[in-house]
Amino acid sequence: MNARSLVGKLSLAFFQWKNLVILLFVGLYVQSLYYSVMKSRDSQAGKRLGACRRRFVWRKPFLGRFESHWKPFLTTKSLYSLMDRPFTRELEKVLWLHKLPFGLQSSVLSAFATLQLLPQQELPEPFERLQCQRCIVVGNGYSIHGQHFGKMIDSHHVIIRLNDAPVKKHKKDVGERTSIRLFFPESALPNPLENNDNETLMVFVPFKPLDFLWLREVLLKTRNKTKVGFWRQPPWEWNGNVSHLRILNPYVTYEATYKLLQLKTWSRRYATTGIIALNLALHMCQEVNIAGFGYPGNHDNATPIHYYNMGRSREKELFQHNLTAERNWLLKMIKQGVIADIANPSFQAQNH
Ligand SMILES: *[C@@H]1O[C@H](CO)[C@@H](O)[C@H](O)[C@H]1NC(C)=O
Ligand SMILES: *[C@@H]1O[C@H](CO)[C@@H](O)[C@H](O)[C@H]1NC(C)=O
Ligand SMILES: *[C@@H]1O[C@H](CO)[C@@H](O)[C@H](O)[C@H]1NC(C)=O
Ligand SMILES: *[C@@H]1O[C@H](CO)[C@@H](O)[C@H](O)[C@H]1NC(C)=O
């Protein structure tokens, strides 16, 4: 071995060693960079979660406990659990002991028969994974007319709408996306796809035993349909996608009426679809906003009731509710920061 080749070998080894050191340093650097990025990301997510949790804590005194197994929709399984005694949870007790709209006493079989027609009954997965999401419940009140809230409403993750309120012709004011729509026979549209997205979850709210029958008849396309017993003629057909149809658990109505609004049992009144939707949102989402809530005052006969027509007469249905209690409760929730009204200037300052 001559000296030259030895030097060559040594220098090669030296270069390899140097490369190794460089590689090692680059590796360490990249790793530390990675950790610092992940850490800042975590702290951002932590901050966001913190903000979510704050609202969550706020809500607790009003909603009582949050049961982790709280399920918003009726399922065949939830009916089977009514056969297990003694009841371990309040939910089953309420369903068993109350009649509609709060429970299923004397309607269990009818509910069961109706559920047989629904291929899917649970909350769809994308909603299950809602974490720190911003939701909005869009009411049908005239107050939203001409307000151009459309973009702000559409910027929410989940948009909940009510009854037969149209969207297409009022995009500027109310937006155009709909994630969830609550309805009942008298407020159903024969062709829900015309005013919803093809993915909209259609949530049926049963208020009386007849409502289950109506749903079965339109799903089975029965020729001879029941006509009496509704406060307004419901449509003869319902051409929505049954895969996106769910039935609200009457317990959600019970909670909205007695836990949120705290109406008296003797008044035999119950929450409007708007407050029921808010209860759903408060359970599902971390941030809950509202738009278009509120009715004109009792003596105001000049302001239309809804944003989508000029009707000024109150529907018969409203006598089943207590609008004063609803207004007071909403104001209280807004004041406490549980819910925000997007028409409120402080909301817009917060979000821009
Ligand atoms: C829903 O509509 C969107 C856009 O209009 C379309 O891309 C999508 O395929 C539709 N989905 C179904 C299930 O029809
Ligand atoms: C249609 O329904 C009504 C009551 O719901 C019943 O009296 C009548 O016999 C039914 N007619 C037919 C042809 O089934
Ligand atoms: C109904 O919804 C399901 C699930 O999203 C979809 O696969 C199906 O194509 C829809 N049916 C119609 C008629 O749009
Ligand atoms: C409606 O609610 C208000 C406020 O909570 C209450 O004072 C009133 O008695 C209620 N009215 C009825 C008919 O229940």
Image (cartoon, grey):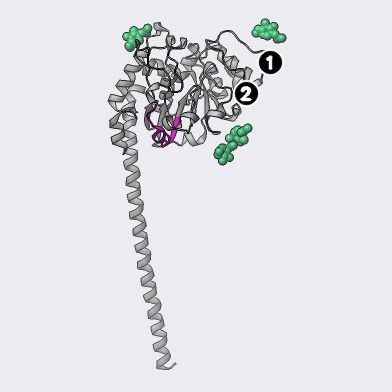
Residue 252, image x, y percentages: 45, 20
Mark sitting on residue 117: 2
* Quarter placement of the N terminus: bottom left
Residue depicted at 43% across the width and 20% down the height? 306
Picture quarter with ligand 1: top right
Residue 82 % position (x, y):
53, 18
Place of residue 223 in the rendered image (x, y in percent of width and height, measured from the top left): 68, 15
Residue segment shown in magenta: 146-159
The residue at the point 60 percent across, 19 percent down is: 114
Number of numbered tags placed on the structure image: 2
Q: Residue at x 32, y 50 (%)?
A: 40
Question: In the structure shown, which secondary structural element does the residue marked by tag 2 occupy?
Answer: loop
* Horizontal arrangement in the rendering, residue 332 relative to residue 319 (left or right): left
Viewport quadrant of the C terminus:
top left
Q: Is residue 139 left or right of residue 336?
A: right
Residue positioned 49% across, 16% down in the render: 95
Q: Which residue is mark 1?
A: 223
Depth check: give the residue in front, 212 or 159: 159
Amino acid of disc 1:
Arg
Q: Name the amino acid type tagged 2.
A: Leu
User: Which disc number belongs to residue 116?
Assistant: none
Q: Quadrant of residue 289?
A: top left
Q: Is residue 301 left or right of residue 93?
A: left
Q: Position of residue 12 (x, y in %)?
A: 41, 82
Label whose residue precedes the other's in the sequence (1 or 2): 2
Dot 1 lies on which element? loop
Q: Does any atom of ligand 2 lie closer than 8 Å to the CB of label 1? A: yes
Question: Could you say which is closer to the camera, residue 312 or residue 20?
Answer: 312
Are the residues flagged by discs 1 and 2 in contact, CB closer than 8 Å?
A: no
Question: Is 50 placed above or below 235 here?
Answer: below
